[in-house]
Amino acid sequence: MTSNFREKQWKIATRIPFTSDYFLKLNPGSKLKKNDLFPEEFGTYYLELGSGWGEVAVSLAKQNPNTGFILMEKKADRLRKTIRDLKEQDIKNVKLLSVNFNWFLEEIFESGIFDEILLNFPDPWPKRRHHKHRTLNPRFLDTIHILLKNNGIFHFATDYGPYARRGIRFFRDDLRFKPISSEFSLQRANFPISHFEQEKREIGSRIYYLDRVKI
C-alpha cells in the first residue's frame, strides 16, 4: 500500500460528516488513549464495530453508566439517528467514530484499552471470490487480541451459517482465545436486539453467536 493511498484513507477517516460533540477526533500517527476518549474515566470500555442505527449501544450504555462505549459506523444517516437517540435520553457515556473500521483499527487505539468488543452481523460476503472482504479472519483476530485487555471478551453474531462455521474454525486454530461456554450459541440472553436482528428473527433465520475470551 503506497503512502499516498494511505494518506487518502486517513483524510477520509478523519472527515466528520457533520458537527457533534459525540464525535471523537483522530490524528494520523497518534493513537487514542483511554484519557482521549472521554472527559471522565470509566470503569470499563466497550467497542462496537459497525454500530448501525445505534439501538444496541444506546440500550447498553443506558444500562451500564460506568462503561464508556465507542461506536464505529461510517454511514451518516445511521450516525444522525444514534446521536438523536443519545441526546433524547441524555446519555453521556458514548462517543462515535465515523470510520471504516476495516482500514486501520490497530492504528486508531492504544493496545489493551477495551474490556469488550462487539461485531454484530457484518456483511457475510457469501460468494467465494468475495471471502477476502470478510471482517472475521485470522488477521482480524490479531487486531482484537491487541485491543482487548487480558480476559477481555469478543462478541460476534451472524445469520449466515457458513460464515459462523468459518469463524469457529478460526478460533479453534487460535489458542489466544477460548469460548465462554460453548463454541457457539443460538441464543443470546439479556442483550439488546437490533432492528436487523429482529427482522432476521421474524423470517425464521437461525442466528449464531460466538463469544470468546482473550487468554
Image (cartoon, rainbow, N blue to C red):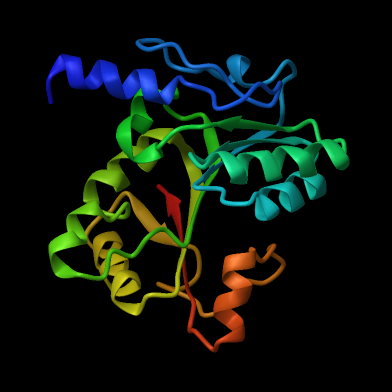
Residue 117: percent from left, percent from top: 51, 46
Residue 4: percent from left, percent from top: 18, 15
- Say if 45 sits above or below 54 in the image: above
- Which residue is depicted at the point 73% across and 15% down? 39
> Which is nearer the eye, 208 or 114?
208
Look at the image and tell me in which quarter the N terminus lies.
Answer: top left
> Which is nearer the eye, 25 or 93?
25
Residue 65: percent from left, percent from top: 80, 39
Residue 66: percent from left, percent from top: 77, 36
Residue 195, picture quadrant: bottom right
- Say if 72 sits above or below 173 in the image: above
Residue 171, picture quadrant: bottom left
In the picture, measured across the screen, residue 64 lies left or right of residue 6, that is right
- Which residue is depicted at the point 36% across and 34% down? 146
Residue 83, picture quadrant: top right
> Which is nearer the eye, 166 or 131?
131
In the picture, measured across the screen, residue 149 lies left or right of residue 5, that is right
Q: Residue furthest bottom?
A: 204
- Say if 129 sits above or below 45 in the image: below
In the picture, measured across the screen, residue 23 lies left or right of residue 204, that is right
- Which residue is depicted at the point 26% across and 70% down? 126
Count of all numbered marks drawn on residues in the image: 0
